[in-house]
Image (spheres, grey):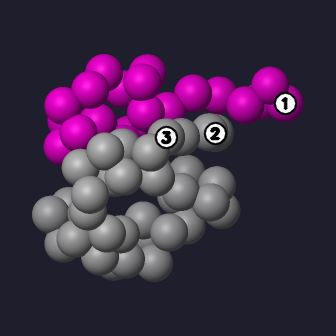
Amino acid sequence: MLNTIRVERAKMNITQAELAQQLHVSRQTIHSIETGKFIPSTVLALKIAKYFKVDFNEVFRLAEEN
């Protein structure tokens, strides 16, 4: 699964730690999601999209091999 979390964070000028704090997860979780090492739960993915005030599909999409 691909995502644009890093881009969305840059638009808002927030760190991984700041995003993690807002979502009540660890900074490592945000890092792992951004790098594609961890696929978030549906609930967490929806919370991320809601936090950035964008549609879910603007933040997450399937990679070609999926």
Amino acid at pointer 3: Thr
Q: Is residue 32 magenta?
A: no
- Residues at discs 1 and 2 in contact (Cβ within 8 Å): no
Q: Position of residue 13 (x, y in %)?
A: 26, 57
The residue lying at 50 percent from left, 69 percent from top is: 31
The C terminus lies in quadrant: top right
Q: Is residue 1 visible?
A: yes
Q: Is residue 41 visible?
A: no
Distance between mark 1 and mark 2 Cα atoms: 9 Å
Determine whether, in the image, residue 57 is placed left or right of residue 43.
right
Mark closest to the chain's N terminus, 1 or 2: 2
Tag 1: Cα neighbours inside 10 Å, few (<14), some, or many (≥20)?
Answer: few
Residue under circle 1? 65
Amino acid at pointer 1: Glu
Q: Secondary structure at mark 2?
A: loop
Q: Secondary structure at mark 1?
A: loop
Tag 2: Cα neighbours inside 10 Å, few (<14), some, or many (≥20)?
Answer: some
Q: Is residue 41 above or below residue 61?
A: below
Determine whether, in the image, residue 6 is placed left or right of residue 45.
right
- Any mark on residue 4, and which? 3
Distance between mark 3 and mark 2 Cα atoms: 10 Å
Mark closest to the chain's N terminus, 1 or 3: 3
Q: On the image, which quarter does residue 11 sit in?
A: top left
Amino acid at pointer 2: Met
The N terminus lies in quadrant: top right
Which segment is the magenta one?
41-66
Q: Nearer the viewer, mark 3 or mark 2?
A: 3
Residue under circle 2? 1
Q: Secondary structure at mark 3?
A: loop
